Amino acid sequence: MIKYYYPNGDHCYRALHTAHAVYHDAEGRLIARAMRADNSALYEFEIVAFELVEAGVRCT
């Protein structure tokens, strides 16, 4: 799992296989690109950080 941290302090979890990229855009913001839940398309969202969560670790 990947835990993404949003600029507003919230966070979300995404399955590792849905992650496509994490990069800095032209304005210096950290952007994540991931596959939509229905596998229809990639989408991008701003984050401030991310971490990989080990298998078997309870996500709360």
Image (cartoon, rainbow, N blue to C red):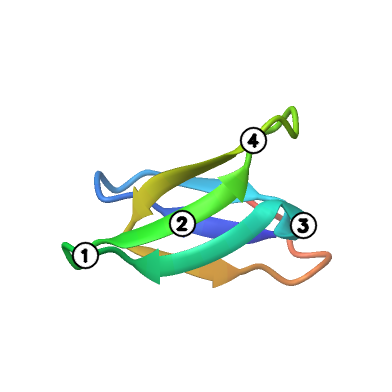
| Lower position in the chain sequence, tag 1 or tag 4 | 1
Residue at disc 1, secondary structure: loop
Q: Which mark is residue 32?
A: 2
| Lower position in the chain sequence, tag 4 or tag 3 | 3
C-alpha separation, residue under disc 2 versus residue under disc 1: 14 Å
- Residue pictured at 20% horizontal, 68% vertical: 28
**Above or below: residue 51 compared with residue 41:** below
Residue at disc 3, secondary structure: helix
C-alpha separation, residue under disc 1 versus residue under disc 4: 22 Å
| Lower position in the chain sequence, tag 3 or tag 1 | 3
- Between residue 24 and residue 6, name the one nearer to us: 24
For badge 3, the amino acid type reads His
Q: Nearer the viewer, mark 4 or mark 3?
A: 4
| Lower position in the chain sequence, tag 2 or tag 3 | 3
| Lower position in the chain sequence, tag 2 or tag 1 | 1
For badge 1, the amino acid type reads Ala
For badge 2, the amino acid type reads Ala
Quadrant of the rendering where the N terminus is positioned: bottom right
| Lower position in the chain sequence, tag 2 or tag 4 | 2
Residue under label 1:
26
Is there CB contact under 8 Å for labels 2 and 4?
Answer: no
